[in-house]
Image: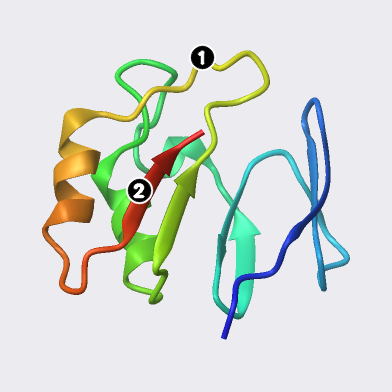
Amino acid sequence: MSSPEIASLSWGQMKVQGSTKTYKDCKVWPGGSRAWDWRETGTEHSPGVQPADVEEVVKKGVQTLVIGRGMSEALKISGFSGRTVRSYTPRPTLINH
């Protein structure tokens, strides 16, 4: 099973193929998607994406994990998040885009 594609992307709006929702930020995995509320895990532009955010998606079975850096490329990935990805077997490929 593959992840749904990002159907459209503009400042503050993401649409995911197969969903009627418009997201500000979202998490996408094989078979689904949901809104990504940074406050759930304390994600901020710096130090960046938190391990709990990464773990949630990796546990859903992704083979490639793409973490977008935002329209201004300001979002970082904390070192802990990268180590979280490397701790899984099989290890997904991490792309910081």
Residue type for callout 2: Leu
For image coordinates 30% across by 38% down, the residue present is 50
Answer with the quarter of the image where residue 6 lies: bottom right
- Considering depth in this image, is 47 or 2 the residue closer to the camera? 2
Question: How many neighbours does mark 2 have within 10 angstroms: few (below 14), some (14-19), or many (20 or more)?
Answer: some
Which color mode does the image show? rainbow
Percent from the top left, x then y, of residue 37? Answer: 54, 43
Mark 2, secondary structure of its residue: strand
For image coordinates 48% across by 36% down, the residue present is 38
Residue type for callout 1: Ala
Horizontal side of residue 95 vs 1, given as left or right: left
Image quarter where the N terminus lies is: bottom right
For image coordinates 22% across by 65% down, the residue present is 91
Badge nearest the viewer, 1 or 2 = 2
As drawn, the label of residue 43 is: none
Looking at the image, how many numbered discs can be counted on the residues? Answer: 2
As drawn, the label of residue 94 is: 2
Question: How many neighbours does mark 1 have within 10 angstroms: few (below 14), some (14-19), or many (20 or more)?
Answer: few
- Considering depth in this image, is 81 or 95 the residue closer to the camera? 95
Horizontal side of residue 31 vs 18, given as left or right: left
Percent from the top left, x then y, of residue 53? Answer: 37, 49
Percent from the top left, x then y, of residue 27? Answer: 55, 55
Task: Name above or below for residue 44 compared with residue 30.
Answer: above
- Considering depth in this image, is 36 or 71 the residue closer to the camera? 71
For image coordinates 23% across by 53% down, the residue present is 85
Answer with the quarter of the image where residue 43 lies: top left
Task: Name above or below for residue 49 compared with residue 23.
Answer: above
Mark 1, secondary structure of its residue: loop
For disc 1, the marked residue is: 74
Task: Name above or below for residue 91 compared with residue 68.
Answer: below
Horizontal side of residue 35 vs 29, given as left or right: right
- Considering depth in this image, is 80 or 20 the residue closer to the camera? 80
